[in-house]
Amino acid sequence: MDWQPHITVATVIENQGRFLLVEELKAGRLVLNQPAGHLEPNETLTQAAVRETLEETGWEVELVGVVGIYLYTAPSNGVTYQRVCFAAKALCHDPQRPLDHGIVAAPWLSREDLAQHPERWRSELVPRCIDDYLAGPLHSLDVIRN
């Protein structure tokens, strides 16, 4: 059996009604996503979420909970992703830190701003994770077992 889902993490970071997102180039398009990426070998899910957020936005964060666990099959390539989405608070920003390859910017947008541009969502998981965060509840980080 060859089918293997890709394990990914994403982080929802809110500050005064705005959410930290990334603008990234994907297949020639500029799309919006949460700071997100793949789990690397010998890395925990929480370590991956903190690392990806720093690499893609220049922000150090503290994880505060689990928003949810999602299974998503991308229509563009048929790949299935298991996304563990965390909530975090922003601690400090390094504006001089180079961002990951393909990341153009890390804007703070309101949910309303995001809703106005569905054509720019990397996937429907982008607004769904924010909506689930807003609706609650947040789950304890203790549900993550290493």
Image (spheres, helix red, strand yellow):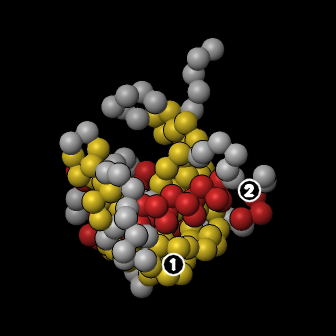
* Left or right: 46, with 22 as reference point: right
Quarter of the image for the N terminus: give it: top right
Of tags 1 and 2, the one toward the viewer is: 1
What residue is drawn where x is 65% and y is 42%?
A: 41
Amino acid carrying mark 2 in the image: Ile
Q: CA distance from mark 1 to mark 2?
A: 21 Å
Check disc 2: other Cα within 10 Å, few if <14, some if 14-19, many if 20+. Answer: few
- Residue in view at x 59 percent, y 46 percent: 39
Is 100 drawn above or below residue 98 in the view shown?
Answer: above
Q: Which residue is nearer to you in this view: 45 or 67?
A: 45
What's the residue type where badge 1 is placed? Ala
**Quadrant housing residue 103:** bottom left
**Residue tagged 2:** 144
Numbered tag placed on residue 90 in the rendering: 1
Q: Position of residue 104 (x, y in %)?
A: 27, 60
Q: Are marks 1 and 2 in contact (CB under 8 Å)?
A: no
Nearer to me, 44 or 126: 44
Q: Is residue 103 visible?
A: yes
Direction from residue 8 to residue 32 in the image, left or right: left
Quarter residue 95 falls in: bottom left
Task: Indicate whether 59 appears above or below 46.
Answer: below
Secondary structure beneath disc 1? strand
